[in-house]
Image (spheres, grey):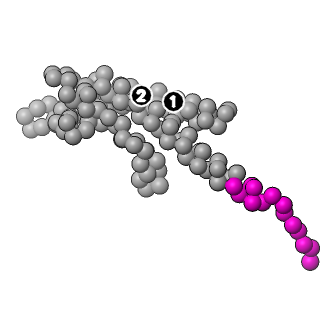
Amino acid sequence: MADMKVEGIEDLLVEIERLGREGSKIENKALKEAGDAVKISIQNETPTRSGKLKTSITVSRVKTKGGIKQVEVGPGSDGYYGKFLEFGTVKMKANPFMSRGYETSKSEAERIIEEEIRKGLGL
């Protein structure tokens, strides 16, 4: 039987762990930047009367759901009535401003994520 000794494995494991943490930071930054682009696009589509709904549009912190990292973009509690505008009511036709904002910014958000990951990894 042959014996094999690997030196420096502890250093390798430390480096792999560091890259994991660094990769997570890069991923979080990319998601936040993309979320900001979607937020601006949604705000541009938001109907304004008082401006309260427009200013209530926020980007959440990075969350993990079902093993997938994500940010949520939409009205906060001050803009609770945004859902009535988005989906309509029995007495009011829908004005899907959030859907329009998302659709117009989707490719830009994807580009930002790709760019931020490349930048973070030094590529």
**Span shown in magenta:** 1-14
Which one is in front, 66 or 95? 66
* Whether residue 14 is situated above or below residue 123 in the rendered picture: below
Q: Secondary structure at mark 2?
A: helix
Identify the residue at horizontal 16%, vertical 23% (top origin): 50
Tag of residue 65: none
Left-right relation of 68 to 41: right
Is 65 contained in the magenta span? no
The residue pinned by badge 2 equals 37
Q: Nearer the viewer, residue 87 or 38?
A: 38
- Three-letter amino acid code at the position of disc 1: Ile
Q: Quadrant of residue 87?
A: top left
Residue 5 on the magenta segment: yes
**Badge 2: few (under 14), some or many (20 or more) residues near its Cα, within 10 Å?**
many
Give the residue pinned by disc 1: 112
Residue 53, percent from left and from top: 21, 29
| Quadrant showing the C terminus | top right
Between 111 and 60, the one nearer to me in the picture: 60
